[in-house]
Amino acid sequence: MKNLKPLFARLNKIPRAALITIGLFVALGTFAPWLAPQDPSAQNLLEAGSGPSAAHWLGTDHLGRDTLSRLLIAANTSLVSVGSVLGIAMTIGIAMGTIAGYHRGWVDDVLMRVVDVGLSIPSLIIALAVIGIVGPGYWTMVLALALAWWPMSGRISRAVAVSIMSKPHIEALRVLGASPWRIYFNHLLPGTIGAVMVYATADAGVAALAVATLSFLGLGIQPPTPEWGQMLVDALPYLESDPRQVLLPGLALTAAVIGFNTLGESIALNRIPKPLTRRTLAARRIEVAGWGKESLDAK
Amino acid sequence: MVHFISKRLQQSLILLFLASVVCFTLVVSAPGNVAVLIAELRGAVATPGYVEQVAEEIGLNKPLLMRYVDWFGDAVSGDFGISYRTGQDVSADLAARMSITGTLIAGSAIIATLLSLALGFLGALWPYKLPDRVSRGLALLGASTPTFFVGALMIYAFSVHFQLLPSFGFSGPETWVLPWLTVAVLPAAVLSRVVRIGLEEAMSSPFVLTAKSKGLSRTAILFRDALPNITPLFINALGTQVGLMTATAIIVEPLFSWQGLGDYFLAGVRFRDFMVVQACLLIFLTFFILVNLIVDLAVLLTDPRIRRQWS
Amino acid sequence: MQNEPLLSVKNLTVDLLTAKSALRPVDGVSYAIRQGQCLAIVGESGSGKTVMNFAPLGLMPTGVTTNLSGSVRFEGQELIGLSEPEVRKLRGKSIGFIFQDPMSALNPVRRIGRQIAEMAELHLNMSPRAAEARALDLVKLVGISDPAARLSQYPHELSGGLRQRIVIAIALAGEPKLLIADEPTTALDVTVQAQILRLLKDLQQRLNMAMVLITHDMGVVAGAADNIVVMYAARAAECGPVDKVLVNPRHPYTRGLINAIPRRDDPIGSEFRGLPGVPPTLGAPIQGCAFAPRCEFAVAACTRARPPMVPTADSNVCVACPVVNQGKAAA
């Protein structure tokens, strides 16, 4: 439980807009199967491409499927696949990073060189290469993206692990004769996981983009499961007559990614001094005004 | 200087070698029998005897090391084999497509550089004021909008709605504009943040206090002191983004019906045409290594501290 | 008395508002400096001596809002309330600055020649070529060997002492009337410290500039300054001519400081005579005398009200101590 405290302290610093967007995405994604008003794959060619109505709030696509339901289920699809990708990638990354940070020396060198190479190749190309060799499919996509993603969390967890290992209390534990396992599992790992979680969340936006991009290319989520990128590519031939079906999934995806990217940006900007906000400035002014001034120079 | 370049070239060659091993291993480890694929490609019934004959013919029965040496030797001399799907010479296809992808990446890189510098400086000149907020908003939007959606919006806006620019084909500058812009959006957004945050970080370093004490205005300090400081940083980030553009090309080229490398690679992945995937991958990796090399040399020229280490 | 002082600071109070807290690093300090004189401002780190000199001239880092009150007059012009562009005109041109750490004070990716020459271009309206020539003169002036070669070098190629000479050359490039040197020797090697100090003192006299020398080193004060202000916890404790204050310190803090300097006749192995206790951390202003908790002479009156700066028997020396000024405060 005590590991959650710094997590909450961090959450407090995150811009509210990001929290709301991410919260909405997670909530809608989780409860989509119950929220979706209609069966997302029920076709009704008679109503194909119709505009918003009482029955279909956001209209229907070229096969007459309810767009709102499909958008909601797509949030679920996206959430689950991004969760799996990041889950797997973080497990690998944290394991590699903490081992490198704990051992240092040649283990560190080798692992970090691998991470460097992994980071220098665009994740889409890594994922596509894997899919090209193994063949498309849901789990191929998840594993391919995880393979492309783990170097990122690997580098962060290594940095965190190194900073934890150099703290005096770890040194003290060693001197007191704590076993390496105890240092690793009781101190290093929990600390690293806590710190990497926030970065990983910020990364979820880019991961969602990758899932959508692979689906857009027809190599990710396979129909009939609805997914934003795939909905968009399905509607692309009808761009001229029915741009709504292209815009809606695109906007939904963009909104979700904006939420995560705002979070990432707020983390990146943390270390730069900023001018005070109007509110803190006013608070400080009041504080100073309370001090008053003693007169000093004897005239 | 010469020492640095020769050392860096050596490193690049080693990386190139490793890249070729990765490409080779990837395809060798592919599930399924390549000989069967080729046999079927030739329209024959894949009888065990014929498959064996094909395997012998393309050298599948040789030891792995020999196969690598053969393949690598061919690749270096520009022979990437024959596409399993179309039966065409991969090298000929590559040659035709490389200039198209080159046009895409070069144009987009220039647009992204100009756009990001403009946006970044806009923010740095009026920090936390309206221009900064606009620039940050645009950057956030640009970095969050999926490239395929950007492309769809471009086509809808400029080709369908206003009918200003053609939405497909590779035939002259007016067909280049939309793909260029589409590819440039993401790197421009990312780089503008690099410029903005880099400038701000430079502006909070101690030598800026000296510059202020000289009586220089904020604008003058920004251009004279902060800009040279972020140049190496910017070149590094630009290199990364140019590398990423190969990935973006995979999305954008099919969208605008450009027959470039990205399109070729995607087709290779779709139809599991290993020779094409392998060749494209090797080209991409070579491109990354090359870009990294150029970036390092450019940083060497712009950062006297690094130059010192190697002189 | 002679003419108007070049810089006259009266009752200056500086409040810094940061994201974390508000603090008052300078609390009602007054001093003055005339042309050709050197004023030393002495105090422990965190006693507000740097902020006192930099804040009125707009040299504060981003992320801090500065509130100034009191009066700072330079050549008769009031600086407090002046807009940033107007203050900027004084910086470099009329007032030159020297910083504590020459390692970070110079831009690492610009040639030294440019960093000096841009001052001459900006303030003396010189062409780039004339400015380069002036930069060469300045580099010679601050006593750097092989001056022409230095101009085309980068800061990291020079030693700390050379870099501090470059910083001095930059400060002099605009032909300022006042030089503010913030611990100019602290970050340097001991052997280089004396050279830099001698150079500064020599230049100050030759160019007839006024100089504010911020330091915590009593040795520096004795060698270079005419007058001294001793600061403790954001306030002035004692001020006056150096020869009088150092020889006959009146304020218990000054006395403690001077007493803490090791002497030649100290027996080998004897303990350092330090001041007991630690200085207060900056924050809200302190009730009464800030030094009272550490003072061996403290009486009840010390903590009751803030002691005023009062001239002592020697009218040039002022002390803010109710014990020393007993009976005079009412006068």
Image (cartoon, coloured by chain):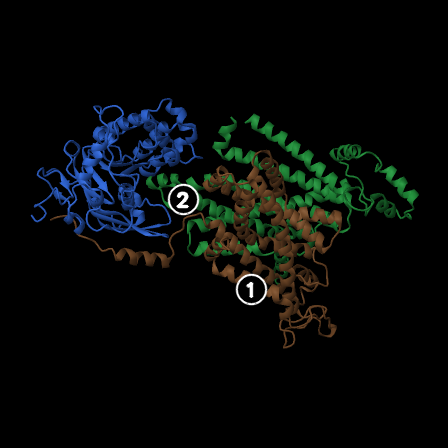
Chain colours: A brown, B green, C blue
The chain under label 2 reads B
Residue A80 in view (yes/no): yes
Helix, strand or loop status at disc 1: helix
Q: Quadrant of residue A24?
A: bottom right
Q: Is residue B61 above or below residue B175?
A: above
- Residue B179, how many percent across, how many down? 64, 52
Quadrant hosting residue B167: bottom right
Q: Which residue is mark 1?
A: A24
Q: Is residue C149 left or right of residue B119?
A: left
Give x and y (percent) for residue C107.
41, 36
Identify the residue at image location x=32%, y=44%.
C59
Q: Is residue B184 above or below residue C271?
A: below
Q: Chain of mark 1?
A: A
- Label 1 to label 2, Cα distance in Å? 37 Å
* Mark count: 2
Q: What amino acid is found at the position of numbered circle 2 in the picture?
A: Ser
From the top left corner, tell me how far across and down residue B171 is, in percent.
69, 50
Residue at image coords 72%, 43%: B280
At a point 60% along the width and 27% down the height, the residue shown is B6
Pick the front one: B12 or A184: A184
| Residue that badge 2 annotates | B204
> Which quadrant holds residue A107?
top right
Q: Quarter of the image containing the N terminus of chain C? A: top left
For the question of whether residue A243 can be seen, the reply is: no
Q: Amino acid at mark 1?
A: Leu
> Do the numbered discs 1 and 2 sit on residues whose CB atoms are within 8 Å?
no
User: The residue tagged with tag 2: helix, strand or loop?
Assistant: loop
